[in-house]
Amino acid sequence: MNTVRYKDTLLELGASPHTGPTSRVFRLADGRVLKRFVPEIGPQLLENEVGWLRELGDTGLVPAVLDVDWLESAFIMEEAGVPLCEANAPADWRRQIGQAVAVLGERGCYHNDLVNGNVLLGSDGQLRLIDFSYATGESVEGARRWLTAPRARYFLDRFAPAYLECVLGGVRPPAELHAAILWDFRAAEDL
């Protein structure tokens, strides 16, 4: 039996963990998901992600946060689905992405990492969004802080000229740029 420790408790794993540059994600045997950030940047990313998940919790677009361990930079959330891919994409996936982008915009949220792996298909056929660790709000200061984050290089390489012009000029980026940032259209073309 494979287990992972969380708040002095051993939790049984349901699948192998997914390891990324800033966190490890564990699918637990009981259906919940544990996300643990790397110690160096964990507190900032945890606060950001949990904050956005709670802010957007009433939209139906994100999994609920069930528990947070601030000392270990980890949290448990409900299961949200499986990664969106060509084999499981619902016929209306483009409409659902468009609606999700609109809701995020209404809430003042820039996801900044909305690629296929962060768009999940729920068992009810609805798309859900995960990984808000790099999301920013409407404030220009928030966007400036995000630009110093470790994974910002990918974002900067693709969107830097237009985005930086807006941010440094104290202007919220236009909706078209927001949509491009929120969805990696090159990856989506395969769906």
Image (cartoon, rainbow, N blue to C red):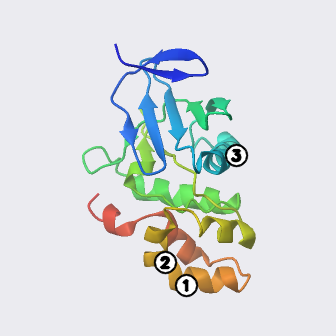
Residue under label 1: 162
User: In 3D space, how far apart are the residues under numbered discs 1 and 2 (Cα atoms)?
Assistant: 6 Å
Quick one: label 2, few (<14), some, or many (20+) residues within 10 Å? some
- On residue 159, the disc is 2
**Vertical order, 37 against 98 (above or below):** above
Q: Is residue 165 left or right of residue 22?
A: right
Q: Position of residue 92 (x, y in %)?
A: 40, 52
The structure residue drawn at horizontal position 33% and vertical position 48%, both measured from the top left corner, is: 89
Which of the 4 quarters of the picture holds residue 115?
A: bottom left
Which of the 4 quarters of the picture holds residue 78?
A: top right
Residue under label 3: 51
Q: Position of residue 171 (x, y in %)?
A: 71, 81
- Quarter the C terminus occupies: bottom left
Determine whether label 1 and label 2 are within 8 Å by CB. Answer: yes
Q: Callout 3: helix, strand or loop? A: helix
Amino acid type of disc 3? Gly
Farthest front residue? 40
Q: Position of residue 124 (x, y in %)?
A: 44, 34
The structure residue drawn at horizontal position 46% and vertical position 70%, both measured from the top left corner, is: 153
Front residue of this view, candidates 49 and 2:
2
Amino acid type of disc 2? Phe
**Vertical order, 61 against 116 (above or below):** above
Q: Callout 2: helix, strand or loop? A: helix
**Vertical order, 112 against 129 (above or below):** below
Mark nearer the N terminus (3 vs 1):
3
Amino acid type of disc 1? Ala
